Amino acid sequence: MSGFRHGVDLGGTKTEIVTLDDGGREVFRRRVPTARGDYRALVHAIAGLVAAADEAVGAAGHVGVGIPGAISPATGLVKNANTTELIGEDLRGDLATVLGRPVRLANDADCFTLSEATDGAGAGFRTVFGVILGTGVGGGIAVDGRLLSGPNAIAGEWGHNPLPWPADDERPGPACYCGKHGCIETFLSGPGFRLDHRGRTGADMTTREIVTAAEGGEPAARESLSRYAARLARSLATVVNVLDPDVIVLGGGMSNIDAIHDAVPARIGRHVFSDRCDTPIRRARFGDSSGVRGAAWLWPST
Protein backbone atom coordinates (compact mmCIF):
# COMPACT_ATOMS: atom_id res chain seq x y z
CA MET A 1 0.00 0.00 0.00
CA SER A 2 1.22 3.51 -0.83
CA GLY A 3 1.79 6.38 1.58
CA PHE A 4 -1.32 8.11 0.26
CA ARG A 5 -4.39 8.20 2.49
CA HIS A 6 -7.89 8.65 1.08
CA GLY A 7 -10.50 10.13 3.43
CA VAL A 8 -14.18 9.83 2.57
CA ASP A 9 -16.91 11.87 4.25
CA LEU A 10 -20.32 10.26 3.75
CA GLY A 11 -22.76 13.11 4.34
CA GLY A 12 -26.49 13.44 4.04
CA THR A 13 -26.34 15.41 0.79
CA LYS A 14 -22.82 14.93 -0.56
CA THR A 15 -20.06 12.33 -0.40
CA GLU A 16 -16.55 13.73 -0.61
CA ILE A 17 -13.06 12.29 -0.89
CA VAL A 18 -9.75 13.94 -0.10
CA THR A 19 -6.33 12.36 -0.58
CA LEU A 20 -3.42 13.36 1.65
CA ASP A 21 0.22 12.56 0.99
CA ASP A 22 2.42 11.31 3.80
CA GLY A 23 3.09 14.86 4.94
CA GLY A 24 -0.62 15.71 5.21
CA ARG A 25 -0.73 17.79 2.01
CA GLU A 26 -3.97 17.57 0.02
CA VAL A 27 -3.35 16.19 -3.46
CA PHE A 28 -6.84 15.23 -4.66
CA ARG A 29 -10.43 16.17 -3.87
CA ARG A 30 -13.80 15.29 -5.41
CA ARG A 31 -17.42 15.24 -4.27
CA VAL A 32 -20.62 13.70 -5.61
CA PRO A 33 -24.26 13.82 -4.45
CA THR A 34 -25.05 11.16 -1.84
CA ALA A 35 -27.20 8.38 -3.24
CA ARG A 36 -29.89 8.36 -0.57
CA GLY A 37 -32.27 5.43 -0.07
CA ASP A 38 -30.05 2.82 -1.71
CA TYR A 39 -27.33 1.19 0.39
CA ARG A 40 -25.65 -0.57 -2.53
CA ALA A 41 -25.53 2.69 -4.47
CA LEU A 42 -23.76 4.31 -1.48
CA VAL A 43 -21.13 1.56 -1.45
CA HIS A 44 -20.49 1.83 -5.17
CA ALA A 45 -20.36 5.63 -5.05
CA ILE A 46 -17.61 5.45 -2.41
CA ALA A 47 -15.80 2.80 -4.47
CA GLY A 48 -15.99 5.06 -7.52
CA LEU A 49 -14.46 7.97 -5.62
CA VAL A 50 -11.65 5.78 -4.30
CA ALA A 51 -10.93 4.48 -7.81
CA ALA A 52 -10.72 8.05 -9.10
CA ALA A 53 -8.36 9.00 -6.26
CA ASP A 54 -6.16 5.95 -6.88
CA GLU A 55 -5.92 6.91 -10.53
CA ALA A 56 -5.10 10.53 -9.72
CA VAL A 57 -2.15 9.64 -7.48
CA GLY A 58 -1.09 6.54 -9.37
CA ALA A 59 -1.29 4.23 -6.38
CA ALA A 60 -3.73 2.35 -4.16
CA GLY A 61 -4.15 4.48 -1.06
CA HIS A 62 -5.29 3.62 2.44
CA VAL A 63 -9.02 4.28 2.88
CA GLY A 64 -10.77 5.83 5.87
CA VAL A 65 -14.46 6.69 5.92
CA GLY A 66 -16.39 9.01 8.20
CA ILE A 67 -20.05 8.14 8.64
CA PRO A 68 -23.02 9.78 10.40
CA GLY A 69 -23.25 6.90 12.85
CA ALA A 70 -21.02 4.37 14.59
CA ILE A 71 -19.87 0.77 14.27
CA SER A 72 -21.29 -1.50 16.95
CA PRO A 73 -18.46 -3.24 18.82
CA ALA A 74 -20.82 -6.16 19.40
CA THR A 75 -21.81 -6.84 15.78
CA GLY A 76 -19.49 -4.82 13.54
CA LEU A 77 -22.57 -3.34 11.88
CA VAL A 78 -23.57 0.32 11.59
CA LYS A 79 -25.74 1.75 14.37
CA ASN A 80 -27.07 5.18 15.40
CA ALA A 81 -26.91 6.53 11.85
CA ASN A 82 -29.17 9.36 10.74
CA THR A 83 -28.51 8.11 7.20
CA THR A 84 -30.83 5.30 8.08
CA GLU A 85 -30.07 3.04 5.10
CA LEU A 86 -26.69 2.35 6.74
CA ILE A 87 -28.19 0.92 9.94
CA GLY A 88 -27.55 -2.79 10.34
CA GLU A 89 -25.21 -2.97 7.36
CA ASP A 90 -21.63 -4.28 7.29
CA LEU A 91 -20.30 -1.16 5.58
CA ARG A 92 -16.68 -1.80 6.56
CA GLY A 93 -16.78 -5.36 5.24
CA ASP A 94 -18.66 -4.48 2.08
CA LEU A 95 -16.25 -1.67 1.21
CA ALA A 96 -13.23 -3.87 1.93
CA THR A 97 -14.62 -6.49 -0.45
CA VAL A 98 -15.34 -4.02 -3.24
CA LEU A 99 -12.04 -2.15 -2.85
CA GLY A 100 -9.85 -5.16 -2.19
CA ARG A 101 -8.14 -3.58 0.82
CA PRO A 102 -8.79 -2.91 4.53
CA VAL A 103 -11.03 0.06 5.32
CA ARG A 104 -11.23 2.01 8.57
CA LEU A 105 -14.52 3.62 9.61
CA ALA A 106 -15.32 6.16 12.31
CA ASN A 107 -18.08 8.53 13.32
CA ASP A 108 -17.92 11.80 11.38
CA ALA A 109 -17.55 13.88 14.58
CA ASP A 110 -14.65 11.62 15.60
CA CYS A 111 -13.06 12.24 12.21
CA PHE A 112 -13.48 15.99 12.71
CA THR A 113 -11.82 15.74 16.12
CA LEU A 114 -8.94 13.63 14.83
CA SER A 115 -8.27 16.13 12.05
CA GLU A 116 -8.19 19.10 14.39
CA ALA A 117 -6.09 17.21 16.96
CA THR A 118 -3.57 16.11 14.32
CA ASP A 119 -2.79 19.35 12.49
CA GLY A 120 -5.66 21.71 13.21
CA ALA A 121 -6.77 24.01 16.03
CA GLY A 122 -6.15 21.29 18.63
CA ALA A 123 -2.64 20.37 17.52
CA GLY A 124 -0.21 20.43 20.45
CA PHE A 125 -2.92 19.87 23.07
CA ARG A 126 -3.03 16.54 24.87
CA THR A 127 -6.83 16.15 25.27
CA VAL A 128 -9.06 17.59 22.56
CA PHE A 129 -12.86 17.71 22.65
CA GLY A 130 -14.18 18.28 19.13
CA VAL A 131 -17.70 19.63 18.66
CA ILE A 132 -19.96 19.52 15.61
CA LEU A 133 -22.78 22.08 15.66
CA GLY A 134 -24.67 21.51 12.43
CA THR A 135 -27.74 19.62 11.30
CA GLY A 136 -27.05 17.51 14.37
CA VAL A 137 -24.79 17.90 17.40
CA GLY A 138 -21.89 15.52 17.77
CA GLY A 139 -18.58 15.30 19.53
CA GLY A 140 -15.37 13.36 19.74
CA ILE A 141 -12.41 12.96 22.08
CA ALA A 142 -8.76 12.62 21.11
CA VAL A 143 -5.95 12.03 23.58
CA ASP A 144 -2.33 12.23 22.45
CA GLY A 145 -3.54 12.33 18.85
CA ARG A 146 -5.60 9.14 19.13
CA LEU A 147 -9.37 8.81 19.23
CA LEU A 148 -11.17 7.47 22.26
CA SER A 149 -14.07 5.19 21.43
CA GLY A 150 -15.18 3.27 24.54
CA PRO A 151 -16.85 -0.14 24.88
CA ASN A 152 -20.08 1.21 23.38
CA ALA A 153 -18.38 3.28 20.62
CA ILE A 154 -20.14 6.45 21.80
CA ALA A 155 -17.37 8.48 23.48
CA GLY A 156 -18.07 12.17 22.99
CA GLU A 157 -21.78 11.83 22.17
CA TRP A 158 -22.73 14.82 24.31
CA GLY A 159 -25.60 15.82 21.97
CA HIS A 160 -27.85 13.10 23.36
CA ASN A 161 -27.56 14.15 26.97
CA PRO A 162 -30.31 16.41 28.32
CA LEU A 163 -29.82 20.16 28.24
CA PRO A 164 -28.24 20.98 31.63
CA TRP A 165 -29.72 23.36 34.19
CA PRO A 166 -32.96 23.77 32.20
CA ALA A 167 -35.34 26.64 32.84
CA ASP A 168 -39.04 25.90 33.25
CA ASP A 169 -39.75 26.84 29.63
CA GLU A 170 -37.02 24.43 28.45
CA ARG A 171 -38.69 21.37 29.97
CA PRO A 172 -39.42 18.75 28.74
CA GLY A 173 -37.84 20.14 25.58
CA PRO A 174 -38.37 19.30 21.91
CA ALA A 175 -38.74 15.70 20.80
CA CYS A 176 -35.53 14.13 19.51
CA TYR A 177 -35.23 11.45 16.84
CA CYS A 178 -33.54 9.24 19.46
CA GLY A 179 -36.91 8.90 21.18
CA LYS A 180 -36.30 11.24 24.11
CA HIS A 181 -37.09 14.91 24.77
CA GLY A 182 -34.81 17.84 25.53
CA CYS A 183 -31.54 16.47 24.16
CA ILE A 184 -28.80 19.05 23.70
CA GLU A 185 -29.06 18.40 19.95
CA THR A 186 -32.65 19.63 19.86
CA PHE A 187 -31.51 23.03 21.15
CA LEU A 188 -28.05 23.50 19.64
CA SER A 189 -28.41 22.06 16.14
CA GLY A 190 -29.18 24.41 13.27
CA PRO A 191 -32.78 23.12 13.02
CA GLY A 192 -33.11 23.45 16.81
CA PHE A 193 -31.99 27.09 16.69
CA ARG A 194 -34.54 27.84 13.97
CA LEU A 195 -37.30 26.01 15.86
CA ASP A 196 -36.57 27.97 19.03
CA HIS A 197 -36.74 31.30 17.19
CA ARG A 198 -39.96 30.34 15.41
CA GLY A 199 -41.53 29.18 18.68
CA ARG A 200 -40.77 32.54 20.30
CA THR A 201 -41.60 34.83 17.37
CA GLY A 202 -43.74 32.89 14.90
CA ALA A 203 -41.25 33.81 12.16
CA ASP A 204 -39.96 30.95 10.00
CA MET A 205 -36.43 32.17 9.20
CA THR A 206 -33.21 30.50 8.14
CA THR A 207 -30.25 30.45 10.49
CA ARG A 208 -28.46 33.03 8.35
CA GLU A 209 -31.51 35.30 8.36
CA ILE A 210 -31.77 35.14 12.16
CA VAL A 211 -28.06 35.87 12.61
CA THR A 212 -28.16 38.74 10.12
CA ALA A 213 -31.16 40.22 11.92
CA ALA A 214 -29.36 39.90 15.26
CA GLU A 215 -26.28 41.60 13.86
CA GLY A 216 -28.56 44.40 12.67
CA GLY A 217 -29.91 44.89 16.20
CA GLU A 218 -33.33 43.23 15.82
CA PRO A 219 -34.35 42.48 19.46
CA ALA A 220 -36.04 39.09 19.02
CA ALA A 221 -33.20 37.75 16.89
CA ARG A 222 -30.65 39.01 19.40
CA GLU A 223 -32.54 37.25 22.18
CA SER A 224 -32.58 34.00 20.19
CA LEU A 225 -28.83 34.21 19.65
CA SER A 226 -28.27 35.00 23.32
CA ARG A 227 -30.34 31.97 24.38
CA TYR A 228 -28.32 29.80 22.01
CA ALA A 229 -25.00 31.01 23.42
CA ALA A 230 -26.20 30.49 27.00
CA ARG A 231 -27.33 26.94 26.23
CA LEU A 232 -24.05 26.17 24.47
CA ALA A 233 -22.08 27.50 27.45
CA ARG A 234 -24.11 25.39 29.89
CA SER A 235 -23.70 22.29 27.75
CA LEU A 236 -19.95 22.70 27.26
CA ALA A 237 -19.54 23.32 30.98
CA THR A 238 -20.76 19.78 31.68
CA VAL A 239 -18.08 18.46 29.31
CA VAL A 240 -15.43 20.47 31.17
CA ASN A 241 -16.74 19.18 34.51
CA VAL A 242 -16.46 15.56 33.35
CA LEU A 243 -13.51 15.54 30.93
CA ASP A 244 -11.62 18.80 31.59
CA PRO A 245 -10.14 18.83 28.07
CA ASP A 246 -7.10 20.93 27.24
CA VAL A 247 -8.99 22.56 24.36
CA ILE A 248 -12.47 22.56 22.83
CA VAL A 249 -12.67 22.94 19.05
CA LEU A 250 -15.94 24.03 17.47
CA GLY A 251 -16.99 23.01 13.97
CA GLY A 252 -20.16 22.72 11.90
CA GLY A 253 -22.28 25.46 10.40
CA MET A 254 -23.42 26.99 13.70
CA SER A 255 -19.79 27.44 14.76
CA ASN A 256 -19.41 30.05 12.00
CA ILE A 257 -21.53 32.51 14.00
CA ASP A 258 -19.01 35.07 15.26
CA ALA A 259 -21.07 36.11 18.28
CA ILE A 260 -20.88 32.72 20.00
CA HIS A 261 -17.07 32.86 20.11
CA ASP A 262 -17.32 35.96 22.26
CA ALA A 263 -20.36 35.00 24.33
CA VAL A 264 -19.60 31.38 25.23
CA PRO A 265 -16.15 31.84 26.84
CA ALA A 266 -17.61 34.68 28.89
CA ARG A 267 -20.48 32.51 30.16
CA ILE A 268 -19.06 29.01 30.55
CA GLY A 269 -17.26 29.72 33.83
CA ARG A 270 -20.57 30.28 35.64
CA HIS A 271 -21.31 26.56 35.32
CA VAL A 272 -17.85 24.99 35.63
CA PHE A 273 -17.08 23.48 39.03
CA SER A 274 -13.96 25.54 39.59
CA ASP A 275 -12.92 29.01 40.65
CA ARG A 276 -12.27 29.83 36.98
CA CYS A 277 -12.38 28.18 33.55
CA ASP A 278 -9.18 28.41 31.51
CA THR A 279 -10.25 25.98 28.76
CA PRO A 280 -9.63 27.58 25.35
CA ILE A 281 -12.51 27.35 22.86
CA ARG A 282 -11.25 27.53 19.29
CA ARG A 283 -12.67 27.58 15.79
CA ALA A 284 -11.81 24.59 13.62
CA ARG A 285 -8.77 25.29 11.46
CA PHE A 286 -10.03 23.30 8.49
CA GLY A 287 -13.71 24.20 8.71
CA ASP A 288 -15.94 21.98 6.59
CA SER A 289 -12.91 19.99 5.42
CA SER A 290 -12.02 18.68 8.87
CA GLY A 291 -14.28 15.64 8.70
CA VAL A 292 -12.95 14.36 5.41
CA ARG A 293 -9.35 15.08 6.41
CA GLY A 294 -9.89 13.23 9.68
CA ALA A 295 -11.14 10.19 7.79
CA ALA A 296 -7.81 10.13 5.97
CA TRP A 297 -5.95 10.50 9.27
CA LEU A 298 -7.59 7.26 10.50
CA TRP A 299 -4.44 5.84 8.89
CA PRO A 300 -1.50 7.44 10.75
CA SER A 301 1.61 8.63 8.92
CA THR A 302 4.06 5.88 8.09
Image (cartoon, rainbow, N blue to C red):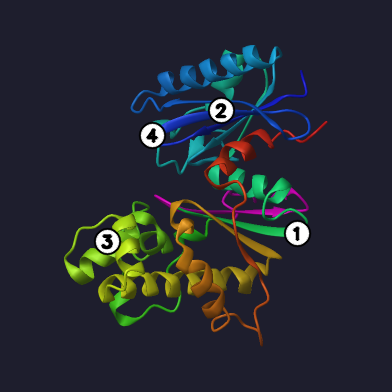
Please tell me whether residue 181 is drawn above or below residue 73 in the rendered image: below
Local packing at callout 1 (Cα closer than 10 Å; few below 14, some 14-19, many 20+) is some
Q: Residue at x 44, y 75 (%)?
A: 230
For marks 1 and 2 on the same chain, the one whose residue lies earlier in the sequence: 2
| Quadrant of the rendering where the C terminus is positioned | top right
Q: Which residue is mark 2?
A: 17
- Name the element at disc 1: loop
Question: What segment is highlighted magenta in the picture?
Answer: 134-155
Q: Which residue is mark 1?
A: 125
Q: Mark 1 to mark 4: distance in Å?
A: 33 Å
Q: Which residue is mark 4?
A: 13
Q: Amino acid at mark 4?
A: Thr
Q: Amino acid at mark 2?
A: Ile
Q: Amino acid at mark 3?
A: Leu
Q: Are marks 1 and 4 in contact (CB under 8 Å)?
A: no
Q: Which residue is mark 3?
A: 195
Does the magenta portion include 148?
yes
Local packing at callout 2 (Cα closer than 10 Å; few below 14, some 14-19, many 20+) is many
Q: Are marks 3 and 4 in contact (CB under 8 Å)?
A: no
Q: Is residue 175 left or right of residue 106?
A: left
